[in-house]
Structure formats: structure tokens, C-alpha cells
């Protein structure tokens, strides 16, 4: 178990693995790359998006190679909070105001389709990743927050989702410890799922390999160079040549595609996990004690996974590429349960970790061909919300690569989307 320790002399805590990384066995990826490989499609990045892409390509029978510089789900996917919720990254009314109702509804629909796809794939491929859909409960800490939750519920009901607004008594019935005085009510969302993200990624990668056309390798990609109708991928193990390259490295996109760096701003999210306790929470949970929000759930083994409090960090941890947890955010996280549930007896903290997200200016991911490098596609900028998109994005990108035309469902995520949405 990861030891809990903070330094008295530094603003950082030693960079540890996450709860997810410590509760799986990590397969060893091959680094046996010949000096030159010619492949049809190369995917860079072994997170949820790269795994989903390799899976759908494999099902279609398209040979591809997945390149990961360390181990599967080592970065954001393996360092998140284990929640998978539908809707855009920002609140649904905010997305409607920013993007227009048509686009916001299309994004809501896509995330629901992605969740349905995931259920189907998990069953067909027999992937065990602790996936279940208990829903989620967002707590309101005052009347203003409860009104905002009600407004969001109204907007979602109009588009086919059925949240429920609860008073304090109804909220208490769903939680196995007395509520603190700040909680006035909440909103239950029925379609939120919980998942072990690394087991999901490993399951998708293993399923892809069973189709016999996917090779997964570990190497560091240094740069991409157009070469006629191909793209040369320069790696630490030698060059690879591919007809198509999919860059799925999220916050690290700017390292390979510097022309897109300004569209994906890194931001560090921090999480901790308490040692197992008796059941208290049966669903995903969230609250807004700080402007960037807090979220948590209880694992089947009793572990409490809690994240958030990014707003207390200088500049809200924006522009950070380091996975170290920090004292100020971790101390703020430690105050969440005592404030919301003052009678809850907390066990020791077993794990602390951080992960790097990538935010775009309009809180939407980017999925597009890179205009100035033929043969290169990019997918990233998930704003801490990549899990709900991955399965459907992988399926749609596979269609884009194996059929003529660009899928209409991906239009809201194009690089030139601001021009298209104005039409």
C-alpha cells in the first residue's frame, strides 16, 4: 500500500501511483521495434482513447500499432476518479449557452451512445472492470446551488435525461452517515457509471490483440515528419513509417503537434483515497465546496476515492505538467468529508495522486485531421471528461478511416468548429 506522507519543507508530495495503478497487474509491453516498420495506422498514446481506437480498428480488421511510452493508462486515464458521466464537461445549460442547443444536445447524445457501446463491448468481450451504473448524486450546499441543479435537471429532461431533485431528507436516505448542516438537497442523475479505468483499458487492449491485427509497443515518440504519402514517426527505438497516425496523448499533444499547443491547456487534478470502511456511499457523489468542484465514490472494497479542490492551488494548477500532488490541494481534500459528513469516522489515507488533464477554450474535445500534416489525426482536450467519449469516438474515427467522408457526429469537435457552429 502506498504510504501517506507529506513533506514539511516542500510544497509537493512525492509522486506516487494511483489507487488504480496499485490494484492491477501491469502487462509488460514489447520494446522490440525493428529499425523500420511500415504500418497502415499508428496510434500514439495508451490511454482510454488509444485503447478504444485500437479496439475498433482491430474489430474492422485494420492492422495498427499502438505506441505507449510507459504502460497502459499511465497518465490521465489511470489517475482519474473512476467516474463516467454523460453530458459535456461543463453544466448542460452552460453548454447550451456556449454552443447552442443543437450542438449541446448532439454532445449529450454522443456520450449516451458511448455508454451504451461500452456496455455492449464489455459483454461481448467479457471485460471485467468493475463497471456498474448506480447513478450519481450532486449535493447542494445552499439554495442557490439547489436552484442551479434544478435548472440543469430541467434542461436535461427536455432532451431525454431524467434527473431527480431531492430535498435534504431524501438525500439523507441515500447516504449511510448523517449529513452536515450545509447540505440542503441534491440532484440524482441516473446514468452515471463507476469503473476501474485501468482494467477497462487493459481489457480493450487485450480484446484488440485477440483479433490478431494490433501490436502494442512501448517507446517514446519524438516527432512526426511527413514523407510523401506516409508519415515518419521518429522514436527512441528507431523510425516507423505509417500511412495514418492518430495522436491521442491529450495534454502532451503540443510535444508532437506544437501548432495545436495553444488549444490544449494542461491542468493538474488531484485525488486521494482512504483505506476501506463500511459502506457509506452507493453511487457517484459530487459537491461544489470550491469553484472547480469535488467528487467521490466508494469502491466495492470499501476504499473512498475523493478528488477535486483544484481551485485552492495557485492558478488552479493550470499550466502544470507534473503529476505530483501538492500540500495545499491535498489538505483541502482532507477537509471535504469532515465538513459534509462530520460524524463519519475516517480511516487513514492510503493513496494520494495527481493526473494531468487538457482543457480547450470551449470545454469540448478536439477530433480532427491536422490540416498541415497529411495523414495525421488528433484527438484530445477532454477537459477531465474523456471516459464518456472514448468508445464512440473510437468507433467514429474508425469509420472515418475506413469509409469515405467525415462522420457528422464529429462535427462539433473539429478544429474549425467555431466557424461551422456559427452557420
Image (tube, helix red, strand yellow):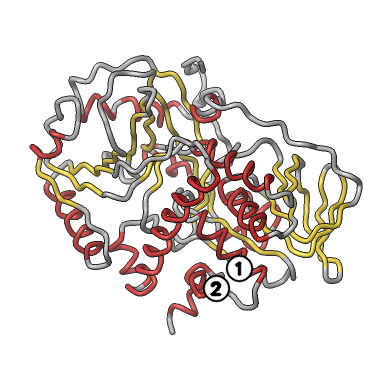
Residue nearest the viewer, comparing 301 with 327: 301
Cα gap from disc 2 to disc 1, whole angstroms = 7 Å
Q: Residue at x 30, y 61 (%)?
A: 92
Residue at 13% across, 43% down: 185
Q: Position of residue 133 (x, y in %)?
A: 34, 43
Identify the image quadrant of residue 179.
top left
Q: Quadrant of residue 131?
A: top left
Query: Could you tell me residue 180's position as x and y percent?
Result: 15, 29
Q: Secondary structure at mark 1?
A: helix
Q: Nearer the viewer, residue 282 or 230?
A: 282
Residue holding disc 2: 407
Residue positioned most to the right = 35
Q: Which label number is shown at residue 233?
A: none
Would you say 272 lies left or right of 135 here?
right
The residue drawn where x is 56% and y is 56% is 380
Mark 2 vs 1: CB contact within 8 A:
yes
Residue 292, image x, y percentages: 35, 45
Element type at mark 2? loop
Percent coordinates x, y for residue 20 in the rendering: 51, 30
Q: Earlier in the sequence, mark 2 or mark 1?
A: 1
Q: Which residue is mark 1?
A: 399
Q: Is residue 257 above or below residue 351?
A: below
Q: Nearer the viewer, mark 2 or mark 1?
A: 1
**In front: 87, or 293?**
87
Amino acid at each position: 500500500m502506498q504510504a501517506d506522507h507529506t513533506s514539511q519543507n516542500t510544497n509537493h508530495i512525492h509522486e506516487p501511483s494511483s489507487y488504480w495503478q496499485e490494484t492491477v497487474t501491469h502487462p509488460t509491453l514489447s520494446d522490440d521495434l525493428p529499425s523500420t516498420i511500415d504500418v497502415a495506422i499508428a496510434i500514439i498514446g495508451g490511454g482510454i482513447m488509444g485503447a478504444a481506437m485500437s479496439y475498433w480498428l482491430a474489430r474492422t480488421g485494420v492492422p495498427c500499432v499502438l505506441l505507449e511510452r510507459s504502460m497502459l493508462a499511465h497518465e490521465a486515464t489511470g489517475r482519474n476518479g473512476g467516474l463516467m458521466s454523460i453530458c459535456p464537461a461543463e453544466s448542460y445549460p452552460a453548454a447550451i449557452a456556449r454552443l447552442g442547443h443543437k450542438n449541446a444536445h448532439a454532445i449529450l447524445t454522443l456520450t449516451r451512445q458511448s455508454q451504451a457501446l461500452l456496455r455492449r463491448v464489455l459483454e461481448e468481450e467479457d471485460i471485467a472492470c468493475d463497471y456498474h451504473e448506480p447513478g450519481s448524486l450532486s449535493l447542494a450546499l445552499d439554495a442557490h446551488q439547489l436552484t442551479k441543479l434544478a435548472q440543469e435537471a430541467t434542461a436535461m429532461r427536455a432532451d431525454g435525461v431524467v434527473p431527480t431533485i431531492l430535498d435534504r431528507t431524501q438525500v439523507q436516505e441515500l447516504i449511510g452517515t448523517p449529513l452536515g448542516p450545509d447540505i440542503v438537497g441534491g440532484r440524482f442523475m441516473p446514468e452515471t457509471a463507476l469503473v476501474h479505468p485501468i482494467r477497462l483499458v487493459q481489457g480493450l487492449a487485450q480484446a484488440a490483440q485477440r483479433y490478431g491485427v494490433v501490436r502494442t509497443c512501448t517507446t517514446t515518440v519524438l516527432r512526426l515528419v511527413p514523407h510523401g504519402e506516409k508519415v515518419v514517426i521518429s522514436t527512441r527505438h528507431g523510425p516507423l513509417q505509417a500511412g495514418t497516425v492518430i495522436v491521442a496523448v491529450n495534454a502532451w499533444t503540443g510535444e508532437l503537434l506544437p501548432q495545436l499547443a495553444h488549444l490544449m491547456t494542461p491542468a493538474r487534478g488531484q485525488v486521494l483515497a482512504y483505506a476501506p470502511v463500511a459502506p457509506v456511499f452507493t453511487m457517484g457523489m459530487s459537491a461544489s465546496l470550491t469553484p472547480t468542484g469535488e467528487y467521490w465514490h466508494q469502491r466495492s472494497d470499501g476504499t473512498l476515492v475523493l478528488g477535486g479542490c483544484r481551485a485552492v492551488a495557485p492558478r488552479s494548477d493550470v499550466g502544470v505538467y507534473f503529476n505530483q500532488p501538492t500540500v495545499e490541494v491535498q489538505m483541502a481534500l482532507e477537509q471535504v468529508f469532515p465538513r459534509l459528513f462530520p460524524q463519519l469516522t475516517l480511516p487513514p489515507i492510503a493513496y494520494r495522486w495527481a493526473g494531468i488533464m487538457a482543457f480547450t477554450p470551449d470545454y469540448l474535445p478536439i477530433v480532427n485531421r491536422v490540416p498541415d500534416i497529411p495523414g495525421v489525426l488528433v484527438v484530445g482536450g477532454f477537459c477531465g471528461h474523456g471516459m464518456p467519449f472514448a468508445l464512440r469516438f473510437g468507433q467514429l474515427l474508425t469509420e472515418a478511416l475506413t469509409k469515405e467522408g467525415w462522420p457528422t457526429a464529429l462535427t462539433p469537435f473539429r478544429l474549425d468548429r467555431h466557424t461551422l457552429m456559427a452557420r
